[in-house]
Amino acid sequence: MTDPSTTPKTTTGLQVLHCTVNGDPVHAAAPANETILEVLRYRLGYTGSKQGCDKGDCGACTILVEGRPVLGCLTLGHLCEGKQIETVEGLAGPEGLHPVQDAFNRYGAAQCGFCTPGMLMAAVEFLRTRTPDMPIPSRPEVAHALSGNLCRCTGYVKILDAVVDAAERMAPERKKVSGETGG
């Protein structure tokens, strides 16, 4: 049996979603079949995550829900009730760009930019999950971590270089993988 206190209230056929986006509590009324990507973009104004394939193939819609990467185009909004959501708009802080954003800028890792929000979110999650005893990730490790994100412009070289550079800047005390040959 469903606990009525945790069930989203409905308003004329719409469910009211309550969650936190980039640290801010938000709510939006949306149909039960609307994806979290649609809720974020069209009801809450968070347009950084891109609507690409709508099939879960490209990764342009990648967001973090409870710290884990989620394809926004495949995740129903009501499944995010009460959850913490992070979008690309929340990466930069008062002190400036997130290290991954900064590295993408410095390396020219974005061309058309359509895939960039999803790439950034996947890279941020990958680097956050690395423990202090792990070495700086190799380019093949980064490629594997970003394998759900497609880019038709860059050929990935600058993206991989940017993520490795960000990893080095985020944890300078870590050692590079010995014998790394690149990409």
Image (cartoon, rainbow, N blue to C red):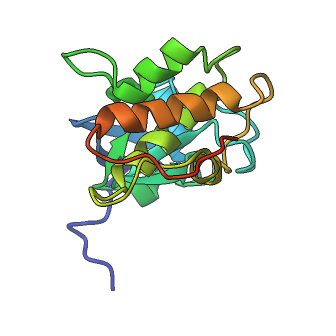
Residue in view at x 69 percent, y 14 percent: 111
In the image, residue 158 sits, relative to residue 94, either above or below, namely below
165 vs 183, left or right, is left
Quadrant location of the C terminus?
top right
15 vs 33, left or right, is left
In the image, residue 144 sits, relative to residue 21, either above or below, namely below
Residue in view at x 72 percent, y 42 percent: 58
Residue in view at x 29 percent, y 47 percent: 18
Q: Where's residue 173, x and y in %?
A: 26, 43
Q: Where's residue 84, x and y in %?
A: 29, 49
Q: How many marks?
A: 0
Q: Where's residue 85, x and y in %?
A: 35, 45
Q: Nearer the viewer, residue 164 or 144?
A: 164
Say whether residue 44 is visible: no
In the image, residue 105 sits, relative to residue 162, either above or below, namely above
Q: Nearer the viewer, residue 168 or 111?
A: 168
